Amino acid sequence: MAQHGGPGQPQPPSLGHGPSNLFSGIMANQGQGGPGLAPPPPQDQQQPTQHPLQPPGPGPQPQGPPQGQPQGSFPGYHASPAVNGYPQPPQPTASPGPGKGRGRGPPGPATPQQVQQQVSYPDPRASPQVARPTPPSQPQRIGGVGNELTKLSPEMLPDHLKRQGEDWHAVFNPEIPRVLDVNLVHHLVHESVVCCVRFSHDGKYVATGSNRSAQIFDVQTGQQISQLIDDSVDKDGDLYIRSVCFSPDGRYLATGAEDKLIRVWDINSRRIKHTFAGHEQDIYSLDFAKNGRHIASGSGDKTVRLWDIEAAQQVLTLSIEDGVTTVAISPDGRYVAAGSLDRSVRVWDSTSGYLVERLEGPEGHQDSVYSVAFAPNGRDLVSGSLDKTIKMWELTQPRGMLPGSGPKGGKCVRTFEGHKVSFTANTELMLAEPC
């Protein structure tokens, strides 16, 4: 690379475009947010032109650098008896780039800005040191989590705040006293994806729905005691069981499938007692009434339907504006609730079919509702949503209102936050129990 000589060297070419010259602007300290180089002196006192890749030149001292100044040049440059009028430029180390510390030899003559500010440098051979936190030898106290336990990973928690297995883990809130424990009880292996799970009312059995079959397991032993398959169905293709539900007395299991049919199975004989048709899309949710006679069903066809097992017929159809994802019947059988893709929870009178509550609005869910359940007192309702919250609602008895004019809203008494929505395609079901 060519080097520039003494004062007679011509001015370097400009680097800008047109009148807006970036290089000249930097030299004149115009609009670059920090101190630039000194402005050039008048033409009659013009100093030697500085090459843009050379280190900053000395100030106006025609006799050259002080005695004892180290001699040298940049790597890649050849020594020359004169560079910009001086015997040799100061010897640098490496150029780390803008904003980083530079290794320097003894400083040369100060520029006018340096004369005014007189910056003091530490050891010129040392690199800038950045303090780095030392990992703690013991787990740190974790706070500020609230209910968002999904932010906690087992690796960052002490042993008393987590439980881990080969392919599962549980974490506990570090901000409250731990009152529960979790143990893995069973691995229930299936031949296909598990779409739904439901406990029997006495807690002794658990039913699952998968492709073309429903299974019933003994909770105590983990053994499969029954598999329910409709042999009359065409064997080609998939037929996923989307919902299952035990009757209160444990004698029957209702299943809802992709073929739009509800089957009521006699568990002991493994035979179908009733088949109900009427839905026009997949059946995503089922619930038995406490009297064991009625079943509520919810479907993607935007309807909730009520069925009478003893009469073997449909007794009520409730239509809404979007797909129904979940249904529940109150303990006293007076109401049926449903959650849907339109973010609302609706509650109807199960006898008349009148809408008595519509739970939505600013206090409501902000995304699709996928689960509803009545509290044992029959007056409270909980709902779970894709918005990562569970809400508890206080249901009010409409008084002096015309049929169908129930309040649009309702009272949300509590919101539980901190859920993380996730989906898994798994052929295993894990059962865990609090200790």
Image (cartoon, rainbow, N blue to C red):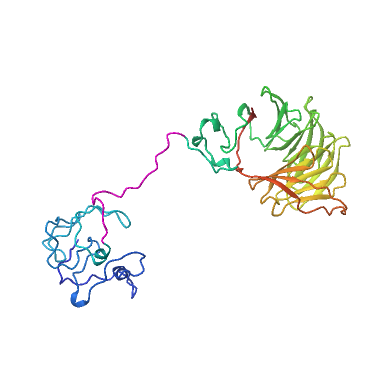
Residue 322 vs 117, above or below: the answer is above
Residue closest to the far top: 221
Q: Which residues are magenta?
A: 118-138
Residue closest to the far bottom: 44
Asked whether residue 278 is in view, the answer is no
Q: List x then y, in percent, for residue 210.
A: 68, 34
Q: Residue at x 22, y 63 (%)?
A: 110
Asked whether residue 132 is in view, the answer is yes
Q: Give the camera-side residue of 120 and 415.
A: 120
Which quadrant of the structure image shows residue 137? top left
Which quadrant of the structure image shows residue 361? bottom right
Pick the quarter of the image with the C terminus: top right
Q: List x then y, in percent, for residue 23.
A: 30, 68
- In reply to whether residue 248 is colored magenta, the answer given is no
Residue 21 vs 150, above or below: the answer is below
- In reply to whether residue 133 is colored magenta, the answer given is yes
Residue 159 vs 1, above or below: the answer is above
Q: List x then y, in percent, for residue 197.
A: 69, 34
Residue 205 vs 3, above or below: the answer is above
Q: Residue at x 26, y 56 (%)?
A: 120
Q: Give the camera-side residue of 317 and 386.
A: 386
Q: Give the camera-side residue of 15 and 85.
A: 85
